[in-house]
Amino acid sequence: MDPEWLAACLEDTSSRFLPFWRLNVLIKQQGPALGWARRGLLGLMDEGVGAVLLGVRDNIAHFAVDISTMAEPLEQLGLGGVAEFCDVRSAAVQLSAEDCAIVAQGRALVDWHDTHRFCARCGAATLSVNGGAMRTCSSCAAEHFPRVNPVAIMLIVRDGHCLLGRQAAWPRGMYSALAGFIEPGETIEEAVRREVMEEAGIEVGAVSYHSSQPWPFPSSLMIGCTGEAISADIRIDEAEVEDVQWFSRETLARVCRGETRADELFIPPPMAIARTLVDAWLADD
Ligand SMILES: [Zn+2]
């Protein structure tokens, strides 16, 4: 990245800056819309994180800016009653898919910069370079890049039923697709088979990829798969899950139509990839 171009963008009054405060994003109540600000915001940002380039749209550079060191940001910005800082999940239900992707990108990068201020190799301070695309060590020159952690999430099916589980900490009645981090040296297919065997004791045969979803808590990529079970008897690992059950098409169709009581059985909302997998399975009758 050309450092002169980047410096000019940071000076340009047409550039846009999206404030994040303690990982919450600024949302204007009118719209609602993302709370893009002008370059005056740079005077308030956390110097250790710096402005993070998100991209260029219509020849205008767009940045994320961390202002977490401010005590009362809405009052200090004069935005009380006009805007608010929202966590990403509540922002996601108010914004377009495109704006949600910008929030996910900004949150993940701001969080990564905040938690990588020191070199993992030698412990010296790191510096943001290339508009926040990486950090370099001030002592040993090691280069550190933002990373994405792959998570496999899978809908396992057999004889008109699919396998859903729940964790004890979840709201009462909530069930979802099983999921787990992909481990070093594993393929996606192997991770699906291992997770389902560990959590539910079910053997899985064929696995296929369906779709994916960024999950910036803090920086995962959910890789949605379907798999065919070749055994049926559930044996749960109580350390990982509270319950796992086979659910019929008829039951899940009723859940998706809102015909069941939420405290008895509900599944994640349409924006979640687990729901996408269930909806696709129900549609593929
Ligand atoms: Zn170092």
Image (tube, rainbow, N blue to C red):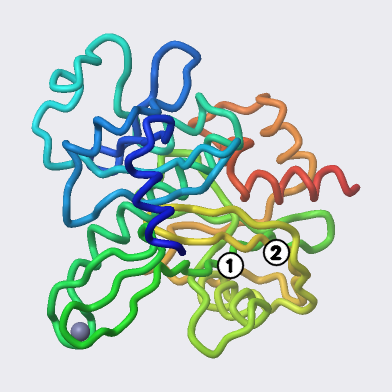
Quarter of image, res 44: top left
Task: Say if 27 sits above or below 160 in the image.
Answer: above
Say which of 268 and 35 sits in front.
35
Q: Amino acid at mark 2?
A: Cys
| Residue at 37%, 30% in the rendered image | 13
Say which of 268 and 186 sits in front.
186
Determine contact: label 1, label 2, CB under 8 Å. Answer: yes
Q: Which mark is residue 225?
A: 2
* Residue indicated by mark 1: 152
| Residue at 75%, 60% in the rendered image | 210
Mark 1–mark 2 Cα distance, whole angstroms, equals 7 Å
Could you tell which of marks 1 and 2 lies nearer the N-terminus?
1
Residue 257 at x, y percent in the picture? 72, 27
Q: Residues within 10 Å of mark 1 (few under 14, many from 20)?
A: many
Q: Which mark is residue 257?
A: none
Quarter of image, res 140: bottom left
Say which of 30 and 271 sits in front.
30
Quadrant where ligand 1 appears: bottom left
Task: Say if 179 sits above or below 214 in the image.
Answer: below
Residue 90 at x, y percent in the picture? 42, 30
Residue 16 at x, y percent in the picture? 41, 34
Taking 125 as reference, is 134 left or right? right
Say which of 200 and 228 sits in front.
228
Quarter of image, res 240: bottom left
Q: Secondary structure at mark 2?
A: strand
| Residue at 58%, 86% in the rendered image | 186
| Residue at 58%, 67% in the rendered image | 152
Taking 252 as reference, is 58 left or right? left
Question: Cβ(mark 2) to ligand 1 < 8 Å?
Answer: no
Residue that extends furthest to the right in the rendered view of this protein: 285
Taking 84 as reference, is 215 left or right? right
Residue 54 at x, y percent in the picture? 46, 48
